Image (spheres, rainbow, N blue to C red):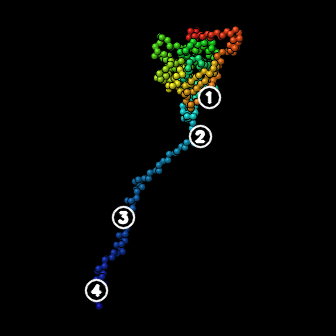
Amino acid sequence: MDVLPAAAEHSAALAPPRESAAGAQTAGPSALQELQELHELQEPQEANHPQEPPPRRIPMFRVPRRAEPLEPHELHPTLWFGHQLGRQADAACPSGFPILDAELPGGGWPRRALSELLLRHSGIGEMRLLAPCLARVQRSERLVMLFDPPAALSAAALQGLALDVEQLLVISTRTPALPSGDSLWALEQALKSGHVGAVLAWLPPRLRAERLRRLQLAAHAHDGPAFMLRESGAAERPTVAPLRLALRAQGADALAVRVLKRRGPALDRPLQLALPPVLNASARERARLAPTAGGAGLRGATFVNLAGQR
């Protein structure tokens, strides 16, 4: 019967057309080519954009570690711990008294700075305290200048302290010829000159702070010790001097030294210094025998004004 062939023809007409084998072979390569082109667009073009070299590594230098931390003076000579004595950039001048040198920064009197000595009155042994340092300066063939001593000086007594009177220059500025405002001018100029070995000055009382500051600035050019003797009442006022000592007599040949200011910790107890005796051995023997030889007292000392000596 013709029913089945007609249905088969009808289903074949409704089915989608099949591609031939040749058509499949021609369509395949074009799809692969499109995938390759898409892949090439996504990848970086190495030919046009070459790869940059890796960054260069900078060599690191390692600082060797110290077994112990640095001391302050190794960083700068003017640095120190609070419990230590400060150091001096220049070599200090030994005082001649080991007990005192052990408590002074640098082991002696400072250079290029003021050293204040406070005393109730002159003549308690300040010259015997400073004589070893002044004599050391003179042995280096440098001049020692004394400004405004309160009394005439004894050449014999100074020679007994190993001082060369020929290398001493006494300057008196407290005269009516000089105005009161210019009394410290000569002292300031001597410090600024840098040609003086040591300076010892008895300053006027109640000196203003700005005048003392000018002297301290001038002392920076002075390669040597600079001693400023002031009244004991100055201890109540501040000072720019890095070293301040208070002196008090403890008998004829002893001196108590209290450190009021220094570059270092405070010192509570005063130092007891034994000074060279005022009289030599023969004079002390005569003084001992004088009461038994009729009660005659010692003759007055003869003072020589070095400013008038030649």
Amino acid type shown at disc 1: Ala
Q: Residue visible at 55% across and 25% down? A: 244
Q: CA distance from mark 2 to mark 4?
A: 111 Å
Amino acid type shown at disc 3: Glu
Q: Nearer the viewer, mark 2 or mark 4?
A: 2
Q: Who is closer to the viewer here, 133 or 249?
A: 249
Which residue was labeled with disc 2? 68
Picture coordinates of residue 200, whole percent (x, y):
55, 19
Q: CA distance from mark 3 to mark 2?
A: 73 Å
Q: Is residue 179 left or right of residue 226?
A: left
Report helix, strand or loop for mark 2.
loop
Q: Residue visible at 30% across and 87% down? A: 4
Q: Nearer the viewer, mark 3 or mark 1?
A: 1
Label 3, residues with CA under 10 Å away: few <14, some 14-19, many ≥20: few
Which residue was labeled with disc 4? 6
Which residue was labeled with disc 1? 102
Q: Earlier in the sequence, mark 2 or mark 1?
A: 2
Q: Earlier in the sequence, mark 1 or mark 4?
A: 4
